[in-house]
Image: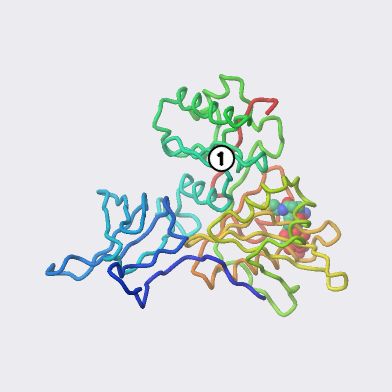
């Protein structure tokens, strides 16, 4: 298989600093503001230890400085004294294996980066997303953490944000498996305002976030169908994608290619060369995301989806990504059965709330 992640987890030690006054660490595009990073930093001359590490969220960066919010303080680091820096996975917040330890909020934020909206805003921790109507995820307010305003004011703010863009307001709220939506204060406030669960769509009522270990996915074998993996979005892949969902020209391509790293995988029919199975892999520090897994109806139960997931897991293992996530509508019984057969389990679930006519 031909697989080369565009922008995988970085380990960005610069062995040959550039010449010039500021010969510090060369930042990669992957170290984006909002990422969780670890920075190895040269201490001032004369200090006992030569270097120290700062772990936290990268909140700002420019030519001269990195600003990192660590657990205890905000630090402003001089780029010239940065020895190395890399993205790291979200912290562990519960017991279990790599795919179980992450909190639901952190996984939601990670998944939003695997499916980046074209237009993004923030309200405290909430993430506001709009992408010309292409997919619920990329066109909804992600309710995570604290919006920094009382709930009613926060909802007013979000409604205005969407109305300014001529888009319906849709909220995405999540909880443990089987959570009672009405018990979430935000959801209760929305229901009070006339929002409905799933906005009238069966596939929006309950979406399962399932996770698994890349090491637990069976490897590709000699008998596996050949898989093509491409860092670029090609027209044939997009046409196959269009067989399973509506495409919004421009917005679809932008969302599909909008993450820090992604691969487009496919299997083609040997005789015709026509693509009959696809998936998109999003690449994060420590995590791989699977989006848009689809097999042509004439070729189901031939092991093609399993082959694509084995290929994703292989790339994940080779690139230090022990955990894999995906999202599947709870009403997609075929899809859920497929993931369960591969050993994936529900991490948490979410639902959309919108006005009935949204
Ligand atoms: C779900 C889907 C991707 C499965 O593709 P596939 O190539 O048929 O899957 P595989 O042949 O690799 O199936 C592997 C195993 O998964 C399970 N499985 C797959 N489809 C199943 C179904 N419809 N019902 C029950 N179990 C199923 C079985 O255990 C199967 O092994 P088996 O055939 O030896 O019994 C395919 O049905 C599809 O494209 N559906 C529409 C899009 C979709 O739902 N995508 C998933 C959303 S995340």
Q: Measured from the top left, where is residue 89 in percent x and y?
A: 44, 58
Position of the C terminus, as image quadrant, is: top right
Q: Measured from the top left, where is residue 221 in percent x and y?
A: 69, 77
Q: Is residue 74 above or below residue 16?
A: above
Q: From the viewer's side, name the closer residue of 260 and 9.
A: 260
Residue pictured at 86% horizontal, 59% vertical: 298
**Quarter of the image where one finds residue 18:** bottom left
Is residue 1 toward the left or the right of residue 286 in the image? right
Label 1, ligand 1: CB separation under 8 Å: no
Residue pictured at 69% horizontal, 48% vertical: 250
Q: Measured from the top left, where is residue 161 in percent x and y?
A: 53, 30
Instruction: Give the farthest residue toward the front.
Output: 20
At label 1, counting other C-alpha atoms closer than 10 Å, the crowd grade (few under 14, some 14-19, many 20 or more) is many
Is residue 105 toward the left or the right of residue 193 in the image? left
Q: Which residue is mark 1?
A: 129
Position of the N terminus, as image quadrant, is: bottom right
Is residue 43 toward the left or the right of residue 346 in the image? left
Q: From the viewer's side, name the closer residue of 192 and 212.
A: 192
Q: From the viewer's side, name the closer residue of 28 and 190.
A: 28
How many numbered markers are drawn?
1
Q: Quadrant of ligand 1?
A: bottom right
Is residue 338 toward the left or the right of residue 74 in the image? right
Q: Measured from the top left, where is residue 78 in percent x and y?
A: 27, 60
Residue pictured at 67% horizontal, 43% vertical: 134
Q: From the viewer's side, name the closer residue of 165 and 52.
A: 165
Q: How is the image coloured?
A: rainbow
Residue pictured at 42% horizontal, 69% vertical: 11
Under circle 1, the secondary element is strand
**Quarter of the image where one finds residue 40:** bottom left
């Amino acid at each position: 298989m031909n697989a080369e992640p565009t922008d995988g987890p970085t380990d960005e030690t610069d062995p040959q600093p550039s010449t010039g006054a500021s010969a510090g660490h060369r930042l990669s595009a992957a170290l984006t503001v909002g990422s969780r990073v670890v920075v190895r930093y040269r201490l001032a001359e004369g200090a006992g230890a030569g270097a120290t590490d700062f772990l936290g969220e990268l909140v700002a960066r420019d030519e001269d400085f990195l600003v990192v919010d660590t657990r205890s303080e905000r630090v402003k680091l001089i780029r010239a004294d940065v020895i190395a820096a890399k993205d790291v996975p979200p912290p562990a917040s519960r017991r279990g294996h790599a795919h179980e330890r992450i909190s639901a909020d952190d996984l939601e934020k990670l998944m939003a980066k695997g499916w980046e909206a074209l237009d993004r805003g923030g309200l405290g921790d909430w993430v506001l997303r709009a992408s010309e109507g292409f997919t619920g995820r990329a066109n909804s307010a992600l309710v995570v953490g604290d919006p920094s305003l009382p709930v009613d004011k926060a909802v007013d703010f979000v409604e205005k944000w969407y109305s300014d863009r001529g888009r319906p307001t849709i909220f995405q709220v999540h909880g443990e498996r089987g959570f009672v939506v009405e018990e979430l204060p935000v959801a209760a406030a929305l229901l009070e305002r006339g929002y409905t669960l799933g906005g009238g769509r069966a596939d929006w009522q309950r979406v399962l976030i399932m996770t698994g270990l890349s090491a637990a996915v069976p490897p590709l074998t000699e008998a596996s169908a050949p898989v093509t993996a491409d860092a670029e979005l090609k027209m044939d892949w997009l046409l196959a994608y269009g067989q399973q969902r509506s495409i919004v020209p421009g917005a679809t391509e932008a969302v599909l290619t909008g993450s820090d790293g992604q691969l487009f995988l496919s299997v083609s029919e040997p005789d015709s060369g026509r693509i009959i199975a696809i998936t998109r892999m999003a690449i994060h520090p420590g995590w791989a995301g699977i989006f848009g897994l689809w097999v042509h109806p004439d070729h189901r139960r031939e092991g093609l989806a399993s082959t694509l997931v084995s290929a994703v897991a292989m790339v994940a293992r080779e690139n230090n990504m022990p955990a894999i996530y995906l999202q599947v509508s709870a009403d997609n019984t075929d899809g859920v059965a497929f993931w369960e057969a591969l050993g994936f389990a529900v991490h948490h679930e979410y639902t959309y709330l919108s006005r009935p006519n949204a």
